């Protein structure tokens, strides 16, 4: 295990390297390109909102023009398939969603890409953490009480998800496996319908994004039991994490990553990584992410980002295999 001193030294060195890289590109002239940032979801959703923030910030940082282009469908996989076949001249990138990269290829036979070969990662942008919430009538105020009640009443509790094979479904199945409890899965088409039934008491609990659950917790319509992020969230959702409450090595988070198609010249990857690193350090960008229920997150290098894609692809492949979900 890394010592605190060694970890601090590595962090400082990484920070210094990022600063030097950022300074090296700070004066780089505009390439004159118009760069499309693909989004695999409709306008107005969290990924789209973050992409539009990025387009504005990248334009200011590089002098190039960045525009967002929505290509929704198949949980982001249609857009990622388009990226795989896009020109590798730096004119097209994507704010890719974890599901499209790491889970969908294991559930759908029809995805038109190989997540480990067809893309060049630039870097992580942020996390969309999930939160475990319950109808206030459920006799549990934390994870330990929920597990105790579920074990005493097997099959009595139900959990809503935003659909078969979604992160809210797969992550909740992992939670139940770790906790050793029998809770019945009830899939919906999207998070809003499921959360509506949790509020009504038709369904007991749900594991959904902080962005979707925050206003419902604030209004008292739902009770937060724990955060699926690695760190506690701010404000009304500042409950202990699921890991703190005895679910080891468990996180329920969807990450967002900026990616190019494979074969983009290294200088363009490095240039945009440097710009992204500078953007990620600004308080304005951090604050704007938090307002939509996202957490800032960054990579130390494009190489680290690519390695992370491969590790997440392997991890979620095992999760999907254990779940038995196959959407054809």
Image (cartoon, grey):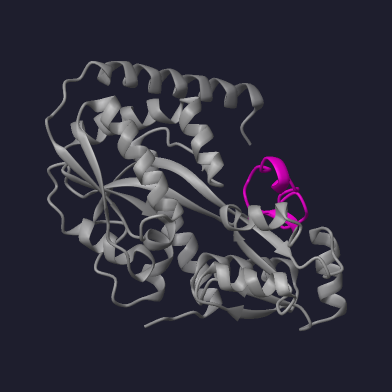
The residue drawn where x is 50% and y is 40% is 289
Residue 29: quadrant of the picture: top left
Residue 224: x and y, percent? 74, 56
- In this rendering, is residue 275 above or below 299? above
The magenta stretch spans residue 153: no
Q: Which secondary structure dominates the residues rendered in magenta?
A: loop
Numbered marks: total: 0
Stretch of the chain drawn in magenta: 224-250
Position of 70 with respect to 231 (left or right) is: left
The residue drawn where x is 74% and y is 65% is 134
Residue 30: quadrant of the picture: top left
- In this rendering, is residue 36 above or below 203? above
User: Dividing the image into 4 quarters, which one contains the N terminus?
Assistant: top right
Question: Seen from this angle, which residue lies furthest front?
Answer: 219
Residue 262: x and y, percent? 20, 50
Residue 56: x and y, percent? 32, 35
User: Dividing the image into 4 quarters, which one contains the C terminus?
Assistant: bottom left
Q: Residue 266 versus residue 74: which sits nearer the camera?
A: 74
Q: Residue 151 versus residue 307: which sits nearer the camera?
A: 151
């Amino acid at each position: 295990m890394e010592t605190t001193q060694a970890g601090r030294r590595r962090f400082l060195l990484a920070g210094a390297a990022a600063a030097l890289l950022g300074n090296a590109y700070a004066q780089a002239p505009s390439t004159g390109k118009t760069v499309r940032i693909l989004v695999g979801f409709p306008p107005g959703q969290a990924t789209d909102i973050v992409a539009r923030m990025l387009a504005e910030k990248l334009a200011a940082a590089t002098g190039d023009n960045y525009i967002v282009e929505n290509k929704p469908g198949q949980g982001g996989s249609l857009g990622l398939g388009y990226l795989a076949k896009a020109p590798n001249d730096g004119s097209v990138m994507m704010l890719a969603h974890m599901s499209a990269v790491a889970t969908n290829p294991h559930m759908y036979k029809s995805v038109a890409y190989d997540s480990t070969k067809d893309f060049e990662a630039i870097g992580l942008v942020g996390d969309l953490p999930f939160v475990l919430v319950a109808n206030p009538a459920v006799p549990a105020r934390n994870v330990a009480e929920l597990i105790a009640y579920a074990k005493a009443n097997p099959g009595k509790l139900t959990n809503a998800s935003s659909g078969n094979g979604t992160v809210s479904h797969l992550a909740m199945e992992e939670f139940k496996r770790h906790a050793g409890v029998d809770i019945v899965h009830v899939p919906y088409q999207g998070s809003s319908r499921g959360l509506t039934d949790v509020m009504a008491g038709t369904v007991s609990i749900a594991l959904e994004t902080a962005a979707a659950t925050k206003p419902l917790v604030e209004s008292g319509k739902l009770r937060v039991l724990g955060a699926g992020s690695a760190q506690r969230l701010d404000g009304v959702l500042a409950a202990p994490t699921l890991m703190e409450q005895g679910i080891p090595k468990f996180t329920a988070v969807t990450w967002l990553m900026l990616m190019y198609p494979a074969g983009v010249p290294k200088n363009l990857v490095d240039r945009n990584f440097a710009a992204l690193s500078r953007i990620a350090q600004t308080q304005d960008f951090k604050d704007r992410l938090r307002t939509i229920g996202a957490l800032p997150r960054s990579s130390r290098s494009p190489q680290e980002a690519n390695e992370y894609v491969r590790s997440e692809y392997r991890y979620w492949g095992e999760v999907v295999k254990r779940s038995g979900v196959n959407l054809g």
